Image: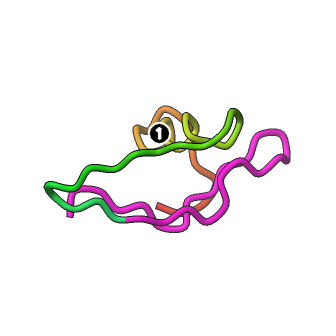
Amino acid sequence: MILKVDGLEKSFRGQKVLNDVSFELKEGEIVSIFGKSGAGKSTLLRCINGIENIDRGA
């Protein structure tokens, strides 16, 4: 396993942006993150990279 996200949650000013996000990425897998504007794609990547502090999860 290369990456494991478990129960990730993030809020901004009381507005929950990520709610209980969980997934595993194994070696050799390719993942795509898509969604409409404001869905939390960039926030998810910023949390994974440690740029944003997370509220809960790992």
Question: Mostly what secondary structure, the magenta segment?
Answer: strand
Instruction: Tally the numbered discs.
Output: 1
Residue at position x 20%, y 64% in the image: 1
The x, y position of residue 12, in whole percent, is: 76, 40
> Which residue occupies the foreground of this view, 16 or 34?
34
Q: Secondary structure at mark 1?
A: helix
Q: Position of residue 31 (x, y in %)?
A: 34, 50
Side of 34 where 37 appears, left or right: right
For the point 47% across and 45% down, which residue is it?
Answer: 33
What's the residue at 69%, 33% (across, down)? 37
Q: Is residue 6 magenta?
A: yes
> Residue 52 falls in which quadrant of the image?
top right
Residue 41 in the image: above or below residue 54: above
**Mark 1 sits on what residue?**
45
| Crowd around label 1: few <14 · some 14–19 · many ≥20 (10 Å) | few
Q: Which residues are magenta?
A: 1-23
Q: Residue furthest right?
A: 14
Q: Is residue 34 left or right of residue 28?
A: right
